[in-house]
Amino acid sequence: MRGPGRSNALGLPDKSSAAVSRVKVSADGHGVVSHAGVGMLRELADLSGLSAGVTAALADTYRGPWIYPPGAVFADLAAAVADGATCIDGVGQLCGDREHVFGPAASTTTMWRLVDERIDAAHLPAIRAARCDARAAAWAAGAAPAAGRWLHIDLDATITIDHSDNKENAAATWKKTYGHHPLLAFLDRPEVAGGEALAGLLRAGNAGSNTAADHITVLGWALESLPAAYRPDPHDPTAHKILVRSDSAGATHKFAAECRRQGVGFSFGFAVDARVRDAVDTLNLAEAWYPAIDSSGAIRDGAWVAEATGLVEMSSWPEGTRLILRRERPHPGAQLRFTDADGMRVTAFITDTPNGVVDGQLAGLELRHRQHARVEDRIREAKTTGLRNLPCHGFDANAAWLEIILTATDLVAWTKLIGFADQPDIAGCEIDTFRYRVLHVAARITRAARRTHLRIDATWRWAHAIATAWQRLRTAFG
């Protein structure tokens, strides 16, 4: 074997066997910290009043003075879940590793006790109220939606699989798996990835997909989680406009009536049954289809929309309910369904939005409903942020864990909306990328004049953006 510096058969330096320069590795570093960006989320929880609100909500669960305020423990849990922790033990390890920077943290046992004992069904409403107050503070600090625009609340359910087979209320699901079937509500914020998590209802695995009572409950919680100035008022025509979107699981008469009672509009997927297929045939004969549009307003090739309100009996739905159909060519390789007509895929939805409200008329209504699909991305990110695993045995404890997941989602969204509004590559990135770019950044710690200085790695591409965002958060709540 040729040694370093030897020549090959052609007499040229042998680069493949050149000595590799190695760095010395030792475990004696001081004054450094990884995952420093998590401190930004943790600080935001304090600045928005979330920590103080949760402390007030859980104060009566203590018999005496506490060592760690329950709101601080809750905030530590939410920040760690946003950073990727999937269980309470993992949260305790992450927080314990950061004590030299962000101060002492509660033990893992204390965290378990908060989730498993203190946040029970009786205290969850107060936790939701604390989250609502924090949202109001964050929106006042710069995270509010653009003025004059409708708010879109997306509802959808998902399956959380139980691999241990011993969690309370875990059951066989309609997808032939085993676990829980939570129903979630997200506020669509297209300017950032992830949206805001308004509410979530943990349900048994065998809960129905189109259970009207569950949809009504989650809608009520979602509206209560909005700041007071943004809530609907059916008796005030100047109140903020809100639209509730769901797939066909939400298309029940009771839920539609509840939306009308609450003063919010609706846009629900609708089953393509025999009546709808007959309407499609009539529309085809009349050539009554109009081109669909994409998000930029341009005509979408191979897709058309039409209204079938007068062709299908709709009297059982709230007054003004409209039935809109979409016809499109299936993408290459897609398998046709028996509801497809003439090789075209047909989908349907109902809405109570009248003409002239949405730009683009029918095509605009169809585009707005189609954007409900973004909720799938919200749920996928939530599963990457703790929802993939419910770590507790008790149902109430897992409901508390779900509330922590929703809080973590909000902290990330508010950080992006306030701190990174001018950084679309960060504001628009998904949670895994956000962790890599922001939360997992390394820093060096220095102390002078009784103050701790966190010096973010200057060679990191997003170092300046992170430092600027941190200062923006402090200024916004100052």
Image (cartoon, grey):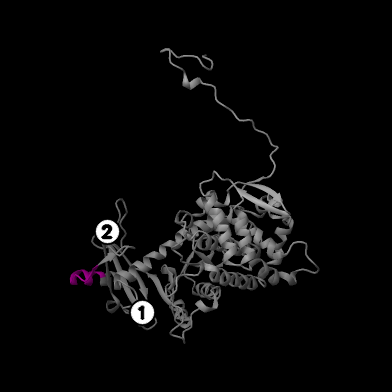
Number of labels in the image equals 2
State the image coordinates of residue 175 (x, y, percent, origin top left): 48, 58
| Residue range (magenta) | 280-290
If you read the primary sequence from the N terminus, does the residue marked by circle 2 or circle 1 appear first?
1
SS at mark 2 in the image: loop
In three-dimensional space, the C-alpha distance between marks 2 and 1, rounded to whole angstroms, equals 27 Å
Instruction: State whether the magenta stretch is mostly helix, strand or loop.
Output: helix
In-front residue for pair 402/270: 402
State the image coordinates of residue 117 (x, y, percent, origin top left): 71, 64
Bin the neighbour count of mark 2 within 10 Å (Cα to Cα): few under 14, some 14-19, many 20 and up: some
SS at mark 1 in the image: loop
Q: Is residue 165 visible?
A: no
- In this rendering, the answer to whether 177 lies above or below 156 is above
Amino acid type, residue under disc 1 in the picture: Thr
Which residue is label 2 attached to? 329
In-front residue for pair 223/1: 1
State the image coordinates of residue 261 (x, y, percent, origin top left): 47, 83
State the image coordinates of residue 14 (x, y, percent, origin top left): 47, 18
Residue 104: name its quadrant. bottom right
Which residue is label 1 attached to? 321
Return the residue found at the far bottom. Answer: 235
